[in-house]
Amino acid sequence: MNSLSTVLLLISLVVCAGLALRVRNLRREFHTLKRSFDTLVTEAPVGVIQTDANGRHILSNAAWTELSGLSTEVTAANWQQVIHPDDLPQVTARWEAAVRTQRAYTNQLRLVKPDGTEREVVAVIHPVQDDNEQAAGFIGVVLDVTELSEARRQVQEKDRLLQDVLDHSASAIYVKDREGRYLLANKRHIELWPSMSDFQPGATAYDWFSEEVARSFEASDRAVFESGEVHTFEEVIPHDGEASTYLSVKFPIRNDRGEITAVGGISTDVSAVEQAHRQLAEREKVLRNLIDLQEQERQLICHEFHDGLIQYVVGATMLLERLLEDPQLPEHCFSTLESVSRCLSKGLEDARRVIRGIRPASLDDLGLQAAVDDLVGELEADGVTVEMHIEGTIDGIDDELQTTVYRVFQELFNNIAKHSNASRVVCSLKVDADNVRLAVQDFGCGFDPAVPTRGFGLTGIRERVRLAGGDYELRAAPGEGTQVQVRLPCARQTTGAAAAPVTPANGMS
């Protein structure tokens, strides 16, 4: 063998050795990849399916067996039996079309395991080609989305419920982002403002409202964004040619990180309520004036009786008494004049009793303490033991409040005398810088407060106390007596007027 042949032989041997090494490396890589693929298929948490080019089953993993309840053999023979009957026609048709066209298959369907358990899955299967770009089969995954689908349905159901609540609310409800763009507006909001009939998320208040109103919306929104707190606004804006009052509650909406991303609002038309409050305030003002006028009239009548008629009766009685002392008075006149004197005295006593019932002179002349003492004396004269506890200077309160306190005691004592059959009553009257508190408790027969009564006494007390801005509490039960507690503020508080808004604004957002 010459030298050239030797060289060529050596070169051939080197090339063959290199090729053999390359083949071994490729074989090793192939086995590594196959083991990796087998491991991936075996351990994958989703079902894996492989078929030939005709769609016939080749392999499936344990996850598929767990998901479908079918063994590998059953899957190879008749995988369709696990498909929900309602889904089977379209699943089969789409799979056959994918095999025929060698295109990817994607579908969401239901599986029914042999034990009856139903699962919802998504199947994604792609065609596989050989080295000559010819169809070699299909491989894909089947993902269990039962819990995800159920969660999605629950979210959708909640969304529907929320939308129903929003659309059937009598209040206007809306949500806006930091740029003032509407993200949501309910049916009532759109009905109130026909210009919003073409509502689309992303529009701003300037698209539907006047510039002045839109600016007021921005200001109230900004207050919520800057403070991060709930704000309440009373907003008055034109609507249908008239000024309407809305009570708007605005609140921050935060993301998962606690950042304020939007502001929500609920605006309720309170125009009718405001009007009713104003009318109620006017009526209560008239009622208070009537009560004040009644007290003035009572005072005037009492003074007229006391300074006029009673004085004449007293004078006539004194003249008769002097005449009866005259020794020259004929005997036949003495008995007649004595009867007249007794009648005048009885009439005088009755007149004074009536005056005390209308308005005692002691209340005007001597003050509340003396007037209350007179009431106590009258009740004790009816055989009732009265314990009165007084704290503070009661005569230091204003005349109008003294009259209210007196009338409450007077009505309660009248009720006790007429209805309670009580032999003992405990009363208290406490005065501090802010309130007058009185309580009256009898130990009589009591009654059921739930049963309507024909009298006006307790109702009158309750209304007097309410008009004075105070509190009234009644406790009673058959056989357990009655207790009434009253708090009256030393400074009269207006009742029935509309409450002032927490934060005023010019418009409804």
Image: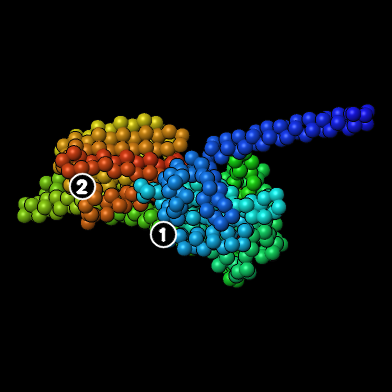
Above or below, 492 against 217 in this view is above
Give the image location of residue 417, x and y in percent. Answer: 19, 44
- Going by the numbered disc 2, the residue's amino acid type is Asp
Q: CA distance from mark 2 to mark 1?
A: 69 Å
- Residue at (83, 30) in percent of width and height: 14
Q: Nearer the viewer, mark 2 or mark 1?
A: 1
Residue 117 left/right relative to 330: right
- Residue at (84, 33) in percent of width and height: 12
Q: Which residue is mark 1?
A: 85
Task: Give the number of the disc on residue 316.
Answer: none
- Residue at (44, 53) in percent of width and height: 78
Give the image location of residue 183, x and y in percent. Answer: 62, 56
Seen from the viewer's position, the closer of residues 73 and 446 is: 73
Seen from the viewer's position, the closer of residues 428 and 17 is: 17
Q: Which residue is mark 2?
A: 448
- Residue at (54, 59) in percent of width and height: 95
Seen from the viewer's position, the closer of residues 243 and 304 is: 243
Q: Is residue 473 visible?
A: yes
Give the image location of residue 414, x and y in percent. Answer: 23, 46
Q: Quadrant of residue 106?
A: bottom right
Q: Is residue 233 visible?
A: no
- Going by the numbered disc 1, the residue's amino acid type is Pro
> Which of disc 1 and disc 2 is earlier in sequence?
1
Bin the neighbour count of mark 1 within 10 Å (Cα to Cα): few under 14, some 14-19, many 20 and up.
Answer: few
Above or below, 61 against 54 in this view is above
Work out which quarter of the rendered image holds the C terminus and state it: bottom right
Q: Residue furthest left?
A: 332
For mark 2, give the secondary structure: loop
Residue 390 left/right relative to 60: left
Q: Mark 2 touching mark 1, by CB under 8 A? A: no
